[in-house]
Amino acid sequence: FYYHLKDEIYCHNYYLRNLCDESRFPNWPIKEVEDVFQSCLHKFKAEMSLFDTAEEKSEHDDAQRILGLSEGDTANELRKAYRKNARKYHLDQNPEGREMFEKIQRSYDILLPYLQDRGHIQSHKLADDENISKKKTQSEGFRDLRHMKNLHLLLKAQLLFCRRYPDDICKYKYPAYKLLLICLQLPASCKELDRLNTKSEVEQVMANNRNKWISSEMLKPLRADFVHTTMNLLFHTCLISPLNAEELIQEGGISVLESLFNYYIQVLSLLSMESQNSSKQYEIAPLSLHTEILINIVHTLSGLAYYESGRTAILSLENIQRFCLNWRLCLSLLFLKPLRAPNSNHNFLREYALEGLSHMSKAHNL
């Protein structure tokens, strides 16, 4: 066993962790670009299929209990357990066993696809060497921390291909926007802000729960890096092909981005008033990283507003007034007012907001 390959993902002759390490291996030549990219997409979809909710995990646990399976069992044990229990409760052998027989069949149907992907039943607990006790909430909404890290690596690889080989990648419509948008959905602990519509409501919630928002796991380095990479990939896929932008709009991308847009406007407003000591105390990712995420969101929304379908989607937003007020803040930068000196990133934010404003002005109602 090669320990240094423990966390690697292998795609069409390439180890992705090394491939994506551009500081150590800059401009690594890649042969068969399209095949490697398609392999990354396939792995990404397979990993996303494990994006279990708590309800799905409970279903898996119930299915394992009904069939008498335990951690480490494979598809072979599943089939043996299914045959054994099906014979026991089949109507020919047990006229009163109909309900249990149906549960056995349902349990088999739940576990078979899972075992075909994972190979064996895995514990929901992570290995101790990942310090799950300290970092588990940074993977809120994911299966576990390893799941989030694997997805992050696959997103990095896709982004690398879009940046370095746009002419090869643009030949195909990006097929996984639904999955990217799932990665960008706010976790349950952050959705309180999404339900608020007015500035006064947001300010009150922020004031009453300052520590909660400052210590939010969305602001920690691991999660912030993940969101940053995902937004970068979303932007670059749209940049290389207009068809991708239209597809993203059709998949409901505007609504998901608006929620994320509102979240980062509010938390950046809060963070800009915090001292450097607070950032260290709560282990918050650098303010510049969160600002770059917001810039990518605004840049992407601005590009989508170029299309009539994008403007229509913006007009149909449930919180259109909130969206417009937040967009105005990106033009004025008033939500960053406590900062002593706006930097070049803030100028980019205003530039992309102005660009989006010119696109949105084509729609009379906007």
Image (spheres, grey):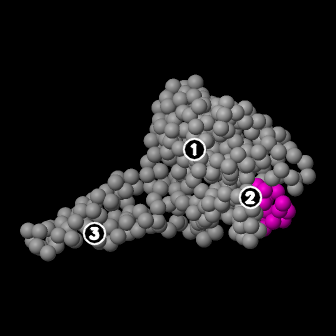
Of 74 and 334, nearer the camera is 334
Q: Is mark 3 on a helix, strand or loop?
A: helix
Mark 3 → mark 1, Cα distance in angstroms: 48 Å
At a point 46% along the width and 46% down the height, the residue shown is 45
Mark 3 → mark 2, Cα distance in angstroms: 53 Å
Q: State the residue position of label 2.
A: 199
* Quadrant hosting residue 167: top right
Q: What residue type is labelled 2?
A: Lys
Q: What residue type is labelled 1?
A: Ser
| Picture coordinates of residue 238, whole percent (x, y) | 59, 34
Residue at the bottom extreme of this rendering: 96
| Picture coordinates of residue 205, whole percent (x, y) | 71, 67
Q: What stretch is highlighted in magenta?
A: 267-281
Of 60 and 193, nearer the camera is 193
Residue at the left extreme of this rendering: 92
Of 366 and 171, nearer the camera is 366
